[in-house]
Image (cartoon, grey):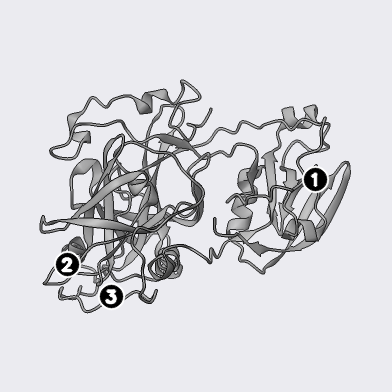
Amino acid sequence: MQYYNSNDEPTSSYLAPYEQEPTLPYLAAPGQTPIPHQATLESTPTPPLAARPPESAPQDAAPPRSPRRWGTALVLGLLLVVLNIGLFAGWQLGRSSTTTPASTTGTLQTGTNSTAPVPALSGNNTEAVREAVIAKVQPMVVQVNVTTSSGNQLGSGVIIDRRGYIITNNHVINGATSINVVLNDGRKLSAQLVGADATDDLAVLKITPPANGLTVATLGDSSKLQVGQDVLAIGSPLGFSQTVTNGIISALNRTASEGQNGATLPNAIQTDAPINPGNSGGALVDLQGNLIGIPTLGAIDPEFRTPANGVGFAIPSNRVKLIAEQIINTGKVTHTGRAALGVSVISVNANLAAQDNLSVDHGALIASVVQNSAAAQAGLRAGDVIIQVGSQAVNDASSLGDALASKNPGDTVSVTIMRGSQQLTVNATLGELQAG
């Protein structure tokens, strides 16, 4: 399986059907012409990637030594599709320049909402609670309409600040030449891009609040979520605005990758609440109406090339708050909060092991080490194969990313490697991934 490249050109006919014109007219927003489906992206990394997320090496960093050739591993897995409707302009691992400077403090200003409180959940009032949550949350969710040089696309957004700040996904507004949002009551307002963080697939928009104010989301604490907890997803799937679906939290702390040059989402929330193209940037809420996540990805079954039923991923609210406040304050992200080892790696399989005469047929082969990084200071070298981080086995580049996603900058971890036929364990104090 191959990835789509950054120009949305399929590098393999296997994925090409997802770029064909949809035959169902309802895939377009009301009043819009149907446009190609969102590009399908694969969850397996391609070399040379940093241990996810990638860290750019300095220009003078030593490349892999020649004449040794680094092979590639082809790992089959679920495909992930970002959930906006429209043309995909390509990922850029950097921050978008701001069009609206934010001179105010980065602390979110939620204000006072006029919605009625949600009753406490009991054994016989689930339906009433759900209805109250929907009434509370729907005014906070907007449809985001985007015009690009290639056509129109849409997604969803959530009002997170009474001054008019809206959170959405970066892939919803990527390549935008103009943006407007449609409020719950049907009013259409022009929006400006405050800043975007491609690495976290988040963006902040700004509208001028109407005279009667805005209903603002209350951000929940995503660290307190539990598997099995009931949730609702609200957005504009397939262009049908203010659609509500329900489900549970299926898993926590997933590491979800959007594929080549795409974002890697640490600690993602997995849910079976149905989410579809157009839900991107919308709301995942608990049964008190607290925003606990931003739906971003849906899985595609690689065998049948169809949506995997009930497998969706959302960016947790604590991550949203960290990123959004920085963008509101400065227009960019300066503190990523992500741990970095400082290596570029390639997945090891039996073919690569034979080709490069490696002593193991699994792990993450270090192709290069960033100067002065945690890996460099720990003595790791190009050609070492990482097979374990702490107590977690590393079978490929993906599992190395999973192992690092749960760590914080400043954590000291043991890294077990194979250097030739010798097994070594070193301690590395992780750095922080630099904002691009």
Cα gap from disc 1 to disc 2, whole angstroms: 56 Å
Disc sitting over residue 384 in the figure: 1
Q: Is residue 328 above or below residue 75?
A: below
**Three-letter amino acid code of the residue under disc 2:** Ala
Residue 394 at least partly seen: no
Front position in the image: 100 or 380: 100
Q: In the rendering, at what x and y percent does residue 403 appear?
A: 63, 55
Q: Residue at x 31, y 34 (%)?
A: 150
Front position in the image: 341 or 400: 341
Quadrant of the frame with the C terminus: bottom right
Cα gap from disc 3 to disc 2, whole angstroms: 19 Å
Q: Is residue 191 above or below residue 349?
A: below
Q: In the rendering, at what x and y percent does residue 292 appear?
A: 36, 64
Cα gap from disc 1 to disc 3, whole angstroms: 50 Å
Look at discs 1 and 3 and give the one toward the viewer: 3
Marks 3 and 2 close (CB-CB < 8 Å): no
Q: Is residue 144 above or below residue 433?
A: above
**Three-letter amino acid code of the residue under disc 1:** Asp
Give the crowd class for mark 2: few <14, some 14-19, many >=20 residues within 10 Å: some
Who comes first in sequence, dot 3 or dot 2?
3
Give the residue at mark 3: 110
Disc sitting over residue 132 in the figure: 2
Which residue is outermost to the bottom?
Answer: 112
Who comes first in sequence, dot 1 or dot 3?
3
Q: Is residue 31 left or right of residue 263?
A: left
**Three-letter amino acid code of the residue under disc 3:** Thr
